[in-house]
Amino acid sequence: MRVFHAQPFPVQVFRAIPVTADKPVVLTIGNFDGVHLGHQALLAQLVTKARELGLAAAVMTFEPHPREFFTHERRPTRLTSLREKLELFEQAGVDRVHVCRFDAKFAALTAESFIDDLLVRGLAVRHLIVGDDFRFGRGREGDFERLRAAGVAHGFTLATMETVVVDGERASSSAVRAALERGDLARARRLLGRPYAISGRVEHGQKLGRQLGFPTANVQLKHRALPLAGIFAVTVSGGGLKAAPGAASVGVRPTIADGLRPTCEVYVLDRDIDLYDQRVSVRFCHKLRDEARYEGLDALRDAIGKDVADTRSWFAEHTIED
């Protein structure tokens, strides 16, 4: 079992479940993509119970997302990267995170092996909290009743987390994703309990924005596709900036060429600052428009100029908290 000491989080991060636990834990299990209000309620319950019992609050999560493993090309976009998820766990007060590699071997685990090898021997679970729809084991054969019986047999208690409803809709990763895909940032914010944001290191790009008079910070996405696209009013923090207003383009840059990978490029208003190799957080405040294809760079430059003007107007009318 490896501990990622290089991770800049007080929370301990493990890339495996140990063969034998070093100490008992209070545990919850899930993908936690987005760490929305439903997840946050579950994590709050986890931390409260752990403090009550004097044990570590632990999370078991998966990389990649099981749906990515099973659906491959039809996999959903991610709301949060693993690093972003770990940061949100730390903010919630989680002490330990076990990141399990979800591969064919893990998918083939029976419900019995999942309980005996992972929960009982590997983690010494004393109290387990799961969502009301939690399933586990090969073919999703395990359910809440299976866990309840295991708890009686092995001496751990079990609780379920009821659904969190926001404005009549269940708080879920799919609901957040759907809101972002249709550009409804306000709805996504209500489901998340915070504005939607991404973080990443600023990398060198084609420098096209600089040529057009609008130098942009190209936020590294690696192989990640975002659940939203278009032109946005954003704020940027990191690299010496704190909630600095900017305009962001998220998409595939159809004016430049066909088949380009998605990028997130941010023009920070009224700042001449070198952000290369800096890690920044981009918070999405308002969608200005969809991405569009233009006939040449002059038309693209004019469109960017209008986007920047519209961004200034939007920030002039809205107060953004740090």
Image (cartoon, rainbow, N blue to C red):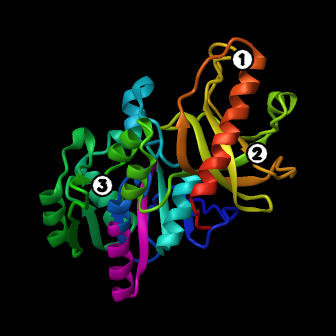
User: How many residues crowd around disc 2 within 10 Å: few (fewer than 14), some, or many (20 or more)?
Assistant: many
Tag 2–tag 3 contact (CB < 8 Å):
no
Task: Give the label on residue 202, or none.
Answer: 2
Spatial separation of the CA atoms under disc 1 and disc 2: 20 Å
Q: Secondary structure at mark 3?
A: loop
Q: Please, what is the three-letter code of the amino acid marked with disc 2?
A: Val
User: How many residues crowd around disc 1 within 10 Å: few (fewer than 14), some, or many (20 or more)?
Assistant: some
Front of the two marks 1 and 2: 1
Boundaries of the magenta span? 41-62
Q: Does residue 49 show up magenta in the picture?
A: yes
**According to the image, label 3 marks what residue?**
171
Q: Please, what is the three-letter code of the amino acid marked with disc 1?
A: Ile
Q: Does residue 308 show up magenta in the picture?
A: no
Task: Give the label on residue 256, or none.
Answer: 1
Spatial separation of the CA atoms under disc 1 and disc 3: 38 Å
Question: What is the x, y in percent for residue 85?
Answer: 51, 56
